[in-house]
Amino acid sequence: MSGSTELDAADPLAAFRERFLPAADVAAYLDGNSLGRPLAASVDRVNEVMRTQWAERLIRGWDDGWMDLPTRIGDELGRVALGAASGQTVVGDSTTVLLYKLIRAALDLRPGRTELVIDRDDFPTDRYLVESIAAERGMTVRWIDEGDVTPERVSSVLTERTAVVVVSAIAYRSGFLADLPGITATVHEAGALMLWDLCHSVGVLPHALDDWRVDLAVGCTYKYLNGGPGAPAFAYVNAALRDGFRQPITGWLGSARPFEMGQGYEPGPGMRRVLSGTPPVLGMVGLLDSLALIDEAGLPAIRAKSIALTEYAIALADQLLPDAVLASPRDPARRGSHVTLDHPGFEAIMPRLWERGVIPDFRRPSGIRLGLSPLSTSFAELDLGMRVIAEELAAAR
Ligand SMILES: Cc1ncc(COP(=O)(O)O)c(C=O)c1O
């Protein structure tokens, strides 16, 4: 195995790391899949928006472009990261709220169908929403049980009553990368709609949502898109579905003529109908910098480094942590950009890791999740982090 020095020296994306702000007491940041690092350019941009746009233009800022930011940044996100033509992506709300809106809208696009499908191990917010929407509408949840979500296992729970299937492209715990085009095609054969949760794949994996004929997708922007804590989420609605698309949070800014303040809700044009209330301007402007960075680096190169980082993490785990169990796929083609290792001793050493500036994620009951963000993570930092984890585990025995 090559050492981290050689890997960093040969890394064509190594220089991008300098664009992020450093953290003085952090030796290894291995949690970019939970909260990405800030870009120096975004700090300048937020400052600029506050000083010149907010302070000087005040309420006139809404007419100067703030109102269009959800669709403008959405289109850019669609182009750079999703393989989506313009007019199908919008930024706003949180992933949770957008999931609610899109699942509810999907049910109305498949009238008469009474079943929703989701993976038993999907992220809690996705499961909780599917369960509560099913209860709200008197529908049935059909669960994909045990193990990775493959087209065959999705197929086994589809019926002629399935309305919508919700799956995460990359499983938040194991890092398993689902077959997006394969599962989408399987769901379509059953006449149902496919909704992908792209939280862990956006920004690290090339997507082709239009070509794969994906119906609906959501994702957050604070992980590999480095939008910052609480940065708003995005929604993709395939153009083919948009005209009949009605979502349940019928706020004024998603309506056809918000400033007429008229009676009765009528959905707005294009993707504006997905919106509900005032756009979170300060929370979304930083995305312009991270999307420009991803565009410059190129998603194929980002994916190649993501694979190299996760391969290196697994090789180091095999060598330094032989008692830990790899909970992520060994096959890089089926793996996202994080690696999860299970060991009963991990939970106890987390405070010591933080004290030493090594910051992975911990997922109960016993998983350390190493989130490797290709534009901001170096091989040397990963190497150091893994060695500290091994040292602390040995010291705790
Ligand atoms: C896969 C997945 N879905 C949904 C969410 C929830 O996102 P939010 O808290 O922005 O609503 C997360 C958050 O980490 C996630 O990882």
Image: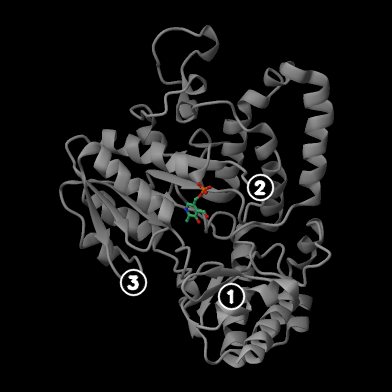
User: Which one is nearer the viewer's eye here, 270 or 276?
Assistant: 276
Q: Is residue 13 visible?
A: yes
Circle on res. 147: 3
Image position of 208 with respect to 277: above or below: below
Q: Is residue 225 left or right of residue 147?
A: right
Q: Secondary structure at mark 2?
A: loop
Amino acid at the residue labelled 2: Gly
Question: Which of the numbered marks, if any, corresponds to residue 310?
Answer: 1
Q: Position of residue 186 (x, y in %)?
A: 27, 56
User: What residue appears at the point 44 percent right and 64 percent down from the top-left corner?
Assistant: 171
Mark 1 lies on a secondary structure that is helix
Viewer-nearest of discs 1 and 3:
3
Name the side, left or right, on which 118 lies relative to 13.
Answer: left
For disc 3, does the CB lie below 8 Å from ligand 1?
Answer: no
The 10 Å Cα crowd at callout 3, few under 14, some 14 to 19, many 20 or more, is few
Sooner in the amino-acid sequence: mark 1 or mark 3:
3
Q: Looking at the image, is mark 2 or mark 1 earlier in the sequence? A: 2
Spatial separation of the CA atoms under disc 3 and disc 2: 31 Å
In depth, the one of 11 and 259 nearer the eye is 259
- Asked where in the image residue 15 lies, by quadrant, the reply is bottom right
- Compared across the picture, whether 215 is left or right of 251 comes to left
Depth check, front residue: 231 or 309: 231
- Residue 366 disc label: none
Q: CA distance from mark 1 to mark 3?
A: 21 Å
Residue 212 in sight from this viewpoint? no
For label 2, the residue is: 227
Residue at 46% x, 39% y is 97
Look at the numbered discs 1 and 3 and tell me whether their residues touch, using CB distance below 8 Å: no
Q: Position of residue 255 (x, y in %)?
A: 46, 19
Q: Name the front one of labels 2 and 1.
A: 2
For the residue carrying disc 2, how many other residues have a C-alpha within 10 Å: few (<14), some (14-19), or many (20+)? many
